[in-house]
Image: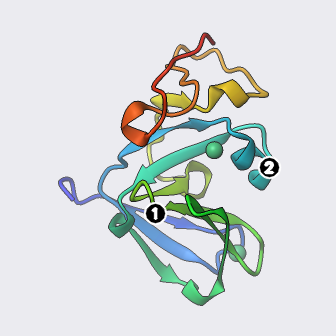
C-alpha cells in the first residue's frame, strides 16, 4: 500500500460495503461472453486488485457466490442482486467492478477478450484478442 489510499464500494442497496486499498493492478474493459451474460451488459469495466486489498466491511454474510468455472467466483448482494466483485483464484486477483467503486479515478488501459465483442469501442486503447501473455493469454492484439 504505497499511497495509503482507499476507496469505498458497495452493492446497489448498500447492504454490502467494502473498501479497496492502494492502486489497482490493472483497469480495463472485458468483452467476454461470460461477463456480458452475467452482467446483462455489452461490456464490463473491471479493476483488478490483489485479494488482500479488498476488505468487506459490512454484510459479508449477505454475499452470494457462483462459479461456473474454477477461474471466476462471481459475487453479488443477496438482497438487491447487485454485482460487487469476482475472485479469480488462478490469477490471484480480484476484479472489482468499476461501477461499484465510484470514487476510484477509473482509467482503462486495455480491452480484453475483444474477439468476443458486441460493442466496438474506438478509444485508441489496445485491444487484446483474449488476455495478455502474463495473464495466461495469447497476447495477440486485434484492430479496433
Ligand atoms: Zn445490495
Ligand atoms: Zn470477461
Instruction: State the residue position of label 1.
Output: 89
Q: Residue at x 32, y 50 (%)?
A: 23
Kind of element beneath mark 2: helix
Q: Residue at x 53, y 13 (%)?
A: 124
Give the mark count: 2
Q: From the top left corner, tell me how far across and down residue 84 is, in percent.
A: 61, 64
Residue 135 occupies which quadrant of the picture? top left
Mark on residue 97?
Answer: none
Q: Residue furthest left?
A: 2
Residue 21 occupies which quadrant of the picture? bottom left
State the residue in front, 58 or 39.
Answer: 39
Image quadrant in which the C terminus is located: top right
Are the residues tagged 1 and 2 within 8 Å (C-beta)? Answer: no
Between tags 1 and 2, which lies in front? Answer: 1
User: Disc 1 versus disc 2: distance between alpha carbons?
Assistant: 21 Å
Q: Residue furthest top?
A: 143
Q: Residue at x 36, y 37 (%)?
A: 134
Q: Residue at x 67, y 20 (%)?
A: 121
Q: From the top left corner, tell me how far across and down residue 83 is, in percent.
A: 68, 63
Mark found first going from the N terminus, 1 or 2? 2
Instruction: State the residue position of label 2.
Output: 37
Q: Is mark 2 within 8 Å of ligand 2?
A: no
Kind of element beneath mark 1: loop
Image quadrant in which the N terminus is located: bottom left
Vertical arrangement, residue 49 with respect to residue 142, above or below: below
Dot 2: within a 10 Å radius of its alpha carbon, few (fewer than 14), some, or many (20 or more) residues? few
Find ligand 2 in the image and state its quadrant.
top right
Q: From the top left corner, tell me how far across and down residue 28 is, in percent.
A: 52, 36
Q: Is residue 59 left or right of residue 66?
A: left
Amino acid at each position: 500500500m504505497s499511497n495509503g489510499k482507499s476507496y469505498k464500494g458497495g452493492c446497489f442497496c448498500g447492504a454490502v460495503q467494502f473498501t479497496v486499498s492502494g492502486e489497482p493492478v490493472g483497469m480495463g474493459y472485458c468483452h467476454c461472453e461470460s461477463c456480458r451474460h452475467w452482467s446483462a451488459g455489452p461490456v464490463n469495466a473491471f479493476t483488478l486488485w490483489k485479494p488482500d486489498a479488498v476488505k468487506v466491511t459490512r454484510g459479508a454474510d449477505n454475499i452470494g457466490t457462483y462459479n461456473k468455472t474454477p477461474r471466476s467466483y462471481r459475487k453479488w448482494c443477496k438482497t438487491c442482486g447487485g454485482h460487487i466483485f469476482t475472485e479469480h483464484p488462478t490469477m490471484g486477483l480480484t476484479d472489482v467492478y468499476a461501477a461499484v467503486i465510484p470514487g476510484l479515478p477509473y482509467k482503462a488501459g486495455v480491452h480484453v477478450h475483444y474477439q468476443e465483442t458486441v460493442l466496438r469501442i474506438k478509444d485508441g486503447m489496445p485491444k487484446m484478442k483474449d488476455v495478455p501473455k502474463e495473464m495466461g493469454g495469447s497476447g495477440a492484439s486485434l484492430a479496433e
